[in-house]
Amino acid sequence: MAVERITLITGGSSGIGAATARALLEHGDLLAVTGRDAGRLAAFAASVDAGEQLLTIAGDAADENDVASAVHQVVDRWGRLDTVIANAGYSLPGTLEDHDPRRCARCS
């Protein structure tokens, strides 16, 4: 009997995070997806129609309390957490060589 993997993806309501979430749902994972925008999370959930296989959690991956809350919600729902994909992020245009470290520090 195969054990379902339980995965948490931060920043999973759009872009690469959403594409990864879709693939993992198709694979059979139980999946929690976080994002700062509750409306985007709801739209993502509606688009995948995964029912009890998906848990959406509004929160900011840069806020340690939101991250702790997300982990607790996953464990409360499914009893454990197997994998975390830290996808949430911020990007500045240009190359890493061109970035001012002080500007990068403000990315969160």
Image (cartoon, helix red, strand yellow):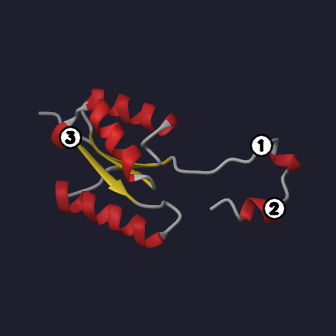
Badge 1 marks a residue whose secondary structure is loop
Which residue does the numbered mark 3 point to in the structure image? 53
Residue 50 position within the rendered picture, expressed as x and y whole percent measured from the top left: 22, 35
- Disc 2/disc 1 C-alpha distance (Å): 14 Å
Labels 2 & 1 near each other (Cβ < 8 A): no
Residue type indicated by callout 2: Pro
Task: Answer whether residue 104 is visible to the viewer in this image.
Answer: yes
Residue farthest along the right direction in this orientation = 98
Which residue does the numbered mark 2 point to in the structure image? 101
Which residue is painted at 23% across and 60% down in the image?
A: 75
Residue 75 appears left or right of 42? left
Residue 103 position within the rendered picture, expressed as x and y whole percent measured from the top left: 79, 61
Which residue does the numbered mark 1 point to in the structure image? 93
Which residue is painted at 43% across and 43% down in the image?
A: 12
Residue 6 appears left or right of 18? left
Of pointers 1 and 3, the one earlier in the residue sequence: 3
- Disc 1/disc 3 C-alpha distance (Å): 36 Å
In this rendering, the answer to whether 62 lies above or below 65 is above
Which dot marks residue 12? none
Labels 3 & 2 near each other (Cβ < 8 A): no
Residue type indicated by callout 3: Gln
Which residue is painted at 87% across and 47% down in the image?
A: 97
In this rendering, the answer to whether 13 lies above or below 65 is above
Badge 2 marks a residue whose secondary structure is helix
Q: Residues within 10 Å of mark 1 (few under 14, many from 20)?
A: few
The label nearer to you, 1 versus 3, is: 1
In this rendering, the answer to whether 26 lies above or below 42 is above
Q: Residues within 10 Å of mark 2 (few under 14, many from 20)?
A: few
